[in-house]
Amino acid sequence: MKTLIFSDSHLTQQFEENKFKYLHHIISSSDQVIINGDFWDGFIISFDQFFNSKWNKLFPLLKKKKTIYIFGNHDSQRLNDLDRIKHFSDIQSMSHTFIEEGKIFTIEHGQRYFPTELNNINANSPYFRRISKFVKFTERIIAHISGDTYQKLLIKNNRKLKKHLPNKSDHSYFIFGHTHSPEVDWSLNFINSGIMCHGLAQYVLIKDGNIEIIKDRYDR
């Protein structure tokens, strides 16, 4: 059994052929897929715009893999269409836990422990959308210049996730996204998978209970 876990792809109406091909490849080569939040970016586009974009070419494949969809802060329940989301996922949840080879894996995006919620902000307002586009554009430029080096500046945010974890158990593992900073801390069995954005392809594979952390690029 090979399970793919990725997060923070932040898909918009802008279609990236290399990113599509990379996602299609890693999804195709997996038995199970778990999208750990921020699959599409509801701070920049609406669900309707995403659903009708070229990214919908991934939907049949995701459905075939019985994809588990975990809500993030950029694609929260209130930003999704809870009927049409079933076109590309079988289960939708705030977190997911499964057991494989005696190991317990808990997957959660991370906004519960490190809140960046919209609260009363209107995500559809032109002003909010412009700010969100600027933030994403800035991060993309920084990533283009420095590669994954900039992510080390964000690693402090992982501490906000770690402090909520229970005492370490040799059999329990916790996999997050959200902070855009990949990290493995075996002292807590903590894993942050990083991002699938800005040319960076970072994700987790679990094969028969064995954990593999991938740091790659899709823009080559």
Image (tube, grey):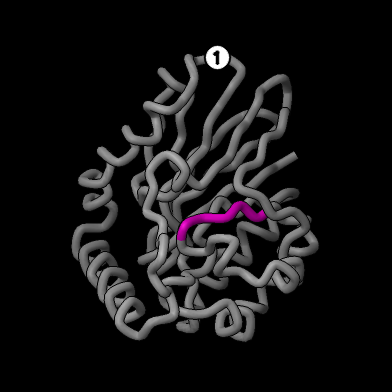
Residue at 63% x, 37% y is: 206
Q: Report x, y in % for residue 28.
A: 70, 60
**On the rendered image, what quadrant is the N terminus found in?**
top right
What's drawn in magenta, residue-wise? 69-73
Residue 215 in sight in this render: no
Q: Quadrant of residue 55?
A: bottom right
Residue at 62% x, 29% y is: 210
Residue 39 drawn in magenta: no
Residue at 69% x, 52% y is: 68
Height in image: 155 above or below 74?
above
Q: Considering depth in this image, is 122 or 73 the residue closer to the camera?
A: 122
Q: Which residue is mark 1?
A: 169
40 left or right, relative to 183: right
Q: Considering depth in this image, is 63 or 82 the residue closer to the camera?
A: 82
Determine the main secondary structure of the stretch shown in magenta: loop
Residue farthest along the front direction in this orientation: 120
Residue 128 in sight in this render: yes
Report crowding for label 1: few under 14, some 14 to 19, many 20 or more residues within 10 A (C-alpha). Answer: few
Q: Considering depth in this image, is 147 or 197 the residue closer to the camera?
A: 197
45 left or right, relative to 26: left
163 left or right, relative to 168: left
Residue at 77% x, 57% y is: 90
Q: Please count the marks in the image.
A: 1
Q: Report x, y in % for residue 12.
A: 48, 77
Three-letter amino acid code of the residue under disc 1: Ser
3 left or right, relative to 196: right
